[in-house]
Amino acid sequence: MNTTAEPAPRRRAHGLNREKILDACLRLAEGSAADALSFRKIGKELGADPTALYRHFSDKDELLLALADRVLAMGLDGYQPGENWKVSLEDLLRRARACFLRYPSVATLAALRVTSQEGELEFVESMLGVLKLAGFDSADAARIHRVCADFMLAWTGFSAGLLLLGEKSTEDDKAWVRSYAKIPPGDYPLAVAAVTIMAEVQDEENFAFALELLIAGIATRLG
Amino acid sequence: MNTTAEPAPRRRAHGLNREKILDACLRLAEGSAADALSFRKIGKELGADPTALYRHFSDKDELLLALADRVLAMGLDGYQPGENWKVSLEDLLRRARACFLRYPSVATLAALRVTSQEGELEFVESMLGVLKLAGFDSADAARIHRVCADFMLAWTGFSAGLLLLGEKSTEDDKAWVRSYAKIPPGDYPLAVAAVTIMAEVQDEENFAFALELLIAGIATRLG
DNA sequence: ACCTGAACACCGTTCAAGT
DNA sequence: ACCTGAACACCGTTCAAGT
């Protein structure tokens, strides 16, 4: 049958490779769409079949780890340790947080994982360098690096989740004030009185406050 | 046609109600199965059609908020404020963390949301009471409650995520040590030297360390 | 060697139909 | 009034088939 008829248009998929795939993922992940990184959508962005990605990454997990490491490496680009260890420590943690929050759908997944790749190595080496400069011995530095890194990762995953929730998150805050206003007088007096202030707290200033307290706490460990 | 033939067996669904549904959810959510709380599985647990749940909850979000609030209320059961505000503050935060971590699939979702229901009200009221006792005025107490609560929620969501990852998480730690061992000598010397200690840090002690630093930081605010 | 596309086993949710 | 079950639009992943 129709051997000369036009076949379904098959694009040669432009020499797909890991770099091109990661670039496409970054384009899709910038912003707050929770389901931006499905294989079908990445495929569409690349003009290729979704399953073509399996030629280059063994599964979605491997793709996301590569993506997370790349994002972190981007965030550290240009970092220079300064003379004040507190400033440098805060700089590193803020850089990591900021680059992940630029790609919230990467952050939610990356927060829980160890990539063991370049970006992470840069980050860990820099963190340990700062803590050494502060005067911590290597065992304490390792321990404090973990508490700082996991604090930042946990909170950044949390914040990324809020960004991905989008409207639902701001609606929650409004519902918070609204429903506390309906509480019979005398019940939960402290909570009712405080709800407006509590609901107005912005996540970014809240993180900054926590980070300040944490770093102050670490400083007391230097004796 | 066969009007007398036996119809497909239809169980009357036992007077389904919100309480019974939440009980079933708790049974399913106890443990570390990431996909334990699908409507199909909850339906099976109840011996009812999955879509019957829509008679009692408008959507999955409403169900999860109700569930989260119930879990928190359970965790606070028996709480009594003590004389030492630091001890009480730590008690409250640990209780909330512990009850959520018993139901990791609830924790990952609950961490990001405000339920505006009973359990949350108890928690907020208790927290503000402790901070008032410590000597903070109401505006500072509101502010510090949020930093403590979000710190706990963020880290608990993080820990719940690790539990749901299960093996993948412990594999990550092993891969961490393994891959750093392969790094050419001279590259990333601090990271390579510290990786064993870093990979041995347990999440629970790490959270405890962070909480200790945070509470110490808060204490300095009392001047 | 690399890409395609149908298929599989899952999701949450909607809605007409049953009792 | 309440429950059922087929259907819809999504997932990640597998695998035989195409070029």
Image (tube, coloured by chain):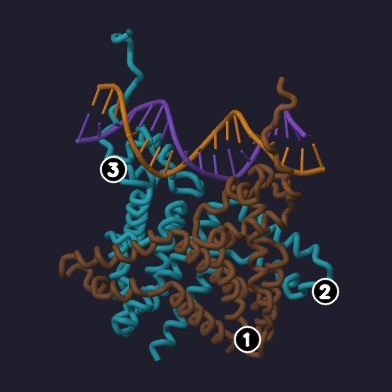
Chain colours: A brown, B cyan, C orange, D purple
Chain assignment, label 1: A
Image vertical order of residue B177 relative to residue B66, above or below: below
The picture quadrant where one finds residue D13 is top right
* Residue at figure coordinates x 16%, y 65% from the top left: A184
Question: What residue is disc 3 on?
Answer: B56
Question: Is residue B107 toward the left or the right of residue B163 in the image?
Answer: left
* Residue at figure coordinates x 68%, y 54% from the top left: A21
Q: Are marks 3 and 1 on the same chain?
A: no
Asked whether the beta carbons under mark 3 and mark 1 sit within 8 Å of each other, the answer is: no
| Location of residue C14 in the rendering, given as x and y in whole percent from the top left corner | 35, 39
Question: What residue is disc 1 on?
Answer: A85
- Cα distance in 3D space between marks 2 and 3: 62 Å
The picture quadrant where one finds residue B200 is bottom right
Image vertical order of residue B212 relative to residue A22, above or below: below
| Location of residue A151 in the rendering, given as x and y in whole percent from the top left corner | 54, 71
Question: In the image, what residue type sits under mark 3?
Answer: His
Q: Nearer the viewer, residue A29 or A162?
A: A29
| Number of the front mark, 2 or 3 | 3
Chain assignment, label 2: B
Q: Give the residue at the far left of this rendering.
A: A185
Question: What residue is disc 2 on?
Answer: B186
Q: Give the residue at the far right of this rendering.
A: B185
Q: Secondary structure at mark 1?
A: helix
First in residue order: circle 2 vs circle 3 = 3
